[in-house]
Image (cartoon, coloured by chain):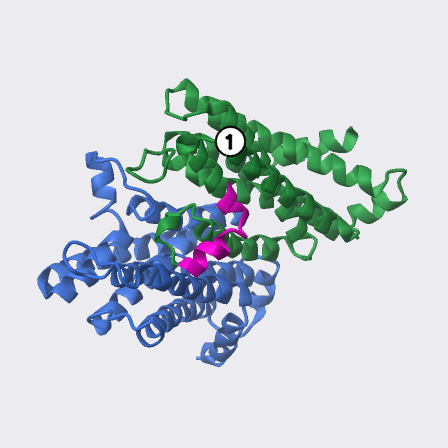
Amino acid sequence: MRVISTLPFTLLRMLKSYIFLLLLLVVPMLLLTFFYFILSDAVNESGESYLYETAISQVLVFQLFGGSIVMTFIHYDLFTKHKERMQLLPFHLPMYAASIVACGTLFSIILGVCLMVFSHFVLGVMLGNELWMLVIICLMAILSSLVCLILTFSVKSFKLAERLSEIYGIGFVVLAGLFFPMPQTPFFQFMGSYGNPLALSIMSVKEMNRGNSSEALQYACILLLAIAVLFVVMLLTGRRKWG
Amino acid sequence: MTIFRYTLIRSFGNKTNLLFLTLFPVICIFLPQGEPWPPLPYGYQYFGIVMLFVGIRLATLIIEDRVNGVVKRLAIAPISYLHYLSGHLLAYAVIMVLQCVIVVYGGVAIGRELAQPHLLLLLYVSYSFVALAIALAWVSIFRSKDTAFLVYMSLIFFMSILGGLIIPLEMFPDLLKRLAVLMPTYWLERGLDWLVYGERMADYWIVQGVLWLYTILFVTIGSFKKLY
């Protein structure tokens, strides 16, 4: 259990990665503030304020990119010139890798919670059932970490893996129709609802706030299923890459 | 011309760059038309954002040169700093103008409604020079390529939102509307708006003039610092 002694340092390293903090915390905060100024009075047809909708999707959108910190750390510690040094250390290396993944996911969740707190207390947006939102944020963070890990393990060049992880994030934002309306074909309709983690999580949070807990659970279960499948894929690709 | 030629080759040599430089403009052509906003199809609106990304991707080659010490070696070669910088900028400008041509005339070829394609092309070209100039000024501050790119990414978010490329300007409160005028993206948006609804030709040339002023300003800032 020597790995535990490395945990504080992993977390410290993550807290000191200013670029991630800038991109995943400061940028969304400024964006939310900006939307607050533009949308504070606007209301949609069903009487919900646009700001509420935007706040939920902003918090969840940035979870799509949360996995990038995990992939950076895993790559740097285990697949660069550090690999041999790490192998010499007297601890169980897979445990160490798991601890990085856990820390990175936790870090991403904490950033999500910071955004929630910010939008609740500073901007005064009512997010509804916040506990359920936290659950969804956790699921999204885990999913994003797994996707990023699979990309790291299955693509030869790390640069390409990074770009692909960005495409994963931006692609699902576009497919969810947040930038512009998608065409009404069966493929895009599927990718804008059940085939899209972002859309699933947004729908789940909204349904929970409207009181339809069974539908909210159903959407969350789809996310869980995706996580289970990707976890197995992650293990398989990881073993191949390491061995 | 040697520097110019090799910069072109280098820009196209990298696979990710190649993807950026050809695929994204082509995607832009096919994005749908919005009702009632924006005036031109979405792709032509978002092409302004793509341009900013392309600018920084190209300009990071200069950081690479600086970090690898290429610039230091150039300093003892019989090449002036002006020569080096102008060779690079010219190559980048050629690439960006090519992209503008692809987007505008590609759109015309498949029959998109672009109001006045020739003026649109001219607008994009001026705007792409601004994007390049800002990127040049930006990379002169940084030492690491990745840091420069990632921090610039957050700047792009704000320039494009505050300039009204993603959200219509009419929705902004008064103060933000006034601040938006400071953004080069605002002038692009205003130009695009003019192409569809504009009447007086003078308004178009004002937009062009402001874009050129931005270009001159940022190129000056960017070339102040010697690159080594």
Front-lying residue, B226 or B64: B226
Residue A156 visible, this angle: no
Indicate yes or no whether the magenta region holds residue B185.
yes
Label 1 sits on residue? B22
In the figure, is residue B129 to the left or right of A74? Answer: right
- Residue B53, compared with residue A57, is above or below; it is above
Height in image: B224 above or below A119? above
Give the chain coloured green: B
Q: Which residues are magenta?
A: B174-187
What main secondary structure does the magenta stretch of the protein show?
A: helix
| Residue found farthest to the top | B109
Looking at the picture, how far across and down is residue A137, in whole percent? 30, 65
Q: Secondary structure at mark 1?
A: helix
On the image, the x and y values in percent for residue B165 come to 43, 45
Is B64 situated left or right of A147 in this image? right
Three-letter code for the amino acid on which mark 1 is drawn: Thr
Q: What chain does mark 1 sit on? A: B
Is disc 1 surrounded by few (<14), some (14 to 19) or many (20+) residues within 10 Å? some
Q: Quadrant of the N terminus of chain B?
A: top right
Residue at left 46%, top 62%?
Answer: A27
**Which residue does the image show at 50% across and 57% down from the upper left?**
B179
Task: Give the quarter of the image for residue A185.
Answer: top left
Q: Position of residue B110 (x, y in %)?
A: 38, 20
Vertical comparison of A168 with B97: above or below: below
In the picture, residue B125 is in which quadrant? top right
Residue toward you, B86 or A236: B86
Q: Is residue A62 above or below residue A132?
A: above
- For image coordinates 43% across by 67% down, the residue present is A104
Q: Is residue B165 magenta?
A: no
Residue A164: percent from left, percent from top? 44, 46
Chain represented in blue: A
Residue B111 visible to the viewer: yes
